[in-house]
Image (cartoon, helix red, strand yellow):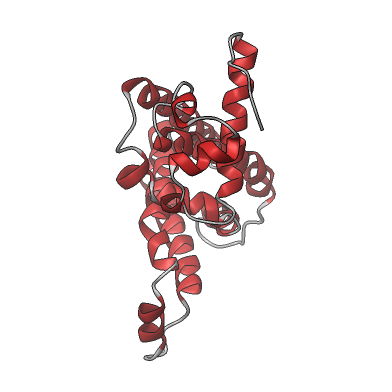
Amino acid sequence: MEFRRARRPEQVAARRAAILDTAEAMLADRPVAGISLRELSCEVGLARSNVLRYFDSREAIFLEVLDRRWSAWLDEVEPLVRAARAEPVPYGRAIAVATALASSLLRHPLLCELVSGTAGVLERDIGIESARAREARATANTDRLADLVRGELPQLDRAGATHFATAVVVITAGLWPSARPAEAVARAGAEPGRPPAAEAFATALTEGLVNQLIGLVVRSS
């Protein structure tokens, strides 16, 4: 794929979209750590220096891919949360909402992978303008999730809903590395009869979100 230099705003937007689409497609075959800026540039058909006209680093590209994925996940999860059936138990609605969120996240391993690498990897080599843009996108996604949760649990105050939306990211990021252990670690863990790593991750994520949300509802009541 060959490009002429983008000059008009719509051309710049199209070029950025092409770079993001290529980066996202490459993630289907390898982790973020295995994709260099040089390889990405070759795939998109641009020199490395030209890619850096649109993003200040490799990390900035994948942060924007993350935010696109997060926004798409919110599109998917919104009707699932609203349709989640609450059991007639204490805090049943909170349990249903948190469980629906966890179940949906489990179907998006790439999103979990990107979330887990945000603070330690992807945010380590970006410029101030990319950081500001990232903060704006992340805040918009956090606010959207908070609004969704608060719509289902009106007793939850705004601060509590925002805290939970942030906790979804933090809990997912913290737990995800354990879902993909090295082969030796996985074998050693299986010997005493522990559940497979993926199963343990699913349980821990669900329990973490449920307990976090119930606690916040109790504090808001």
Q: How many marks?
A: 0
**In the depicted structure, whether residue 192 falls above or below residue 144:** below
Which residue is at 65% across, 39% downward? 75
Identity of the residue drawn at 39% across and 25% down: 130
Locate residue 101, reporting x and y percent.
56, 52
Q: Using residue 81 as the reference point, say whether residue 112 is left or right of it.
A: left
Nearest the camera: 161 or 45?
45
- Is residue 152 visible in the rendered image? The answer is no
Residue drawn at x 57%, y 48% is 26
Vertical comparison of 170 with 3: above or below: below
Work out which quarter of the rendered image holds the C terminus and state it: top left
Give how far across and how far down residue 54 sits, in percent.
49, 23
Compared to 29, does 120 lie above or below?
Answer: above
Looking at the image, which residue is at 60% across and 19% down?
13
Q: Is 187 placed above or below 138 here?
A: below
Is residue 147 something that shows in the picture?
yes
Name the image quarter holding the N terminus: top right
